[in-house]
Amino acid sequence: MRQLAITIKAPARARKVLVELDANQFETLASVLGFFSTDFLASVNRAEKDLVAGQTREISSLKELRNKFD
């Protein structure tokens, strides 16, 4: 697995974290996470088709999905 050196800045008591990546680092991260895999790209294409066809629904919380699949 490739190593990725990124800069992470987190103030002592803040609830936010700033991650700085240049274009090459971002591409490496996307590759490591599998965003260029054929399976992922196919799932994105299916999701776009579902969105265009209106086969989506709005949710207010991820808990709604958990309750649906329990």
Image (tube, rainbow, N blue to C red):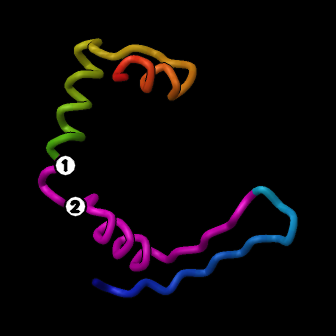
Can you tell which mark lies on residue 41?
A: 1
Question: What amino acid is labelled 2 in the image?
Answer: Phe
* Front residue of 70 and 36: 70
* Front residue of 67 and 39: 67
Identify the secondary structure beneath mark 2: loop
For residue 27, above or below residue 62: below
**Given contact means CB atoms under 8 Å apart, are the residues at marks 2 and 1 in contact?**
yes
Judged from this view, the residue extending furthest toward the front is 70
Return the x and y of residue 68 as percentages of the image width and height: 38, 17
Please name the residue shown 34% across and 76% down the image: 28
For residue 5, above or below residue 42: below
Can you tell which mark lies on residue 36?
A: 2
**Which segment is the magenta one?**
16-41
Say few, some or many: other residues with alpha carbon within 10 Å of mark 1 (under 14 / 14 to 19 / 20 or more): few
Say few, some or many: other residues with alpha carbon within 10 Å of mark 2 (under 14 / 14 to 19 / 20 or more): few
Return the x and y of residue 12 as percentages of the image width and height: 85, 71
> Left of 23 or right of it: where is 11?
right
Q: Earlier in the sequence, mark 2 or mark 1?
A: 2
Question: What amino acid is labelled 1 in the image?
Answer: Leu
Q: How many marks?
A: 2
Return the x and y of residue 44 as percentages of the image width and height: 24, 40
Is-magenta flag for residue 15? no
State the image quarter where residue 9 is shown.
bottom right
State the image quarter where residue 56 is shown.
top left
Is-magenta flag for residue 39? yes
For residue 24, above or below residue 49: below
Can you tell which mark lies on residue 5?
A: none
Quote the CA–CA distance across marks 2 and 1: 7 Å
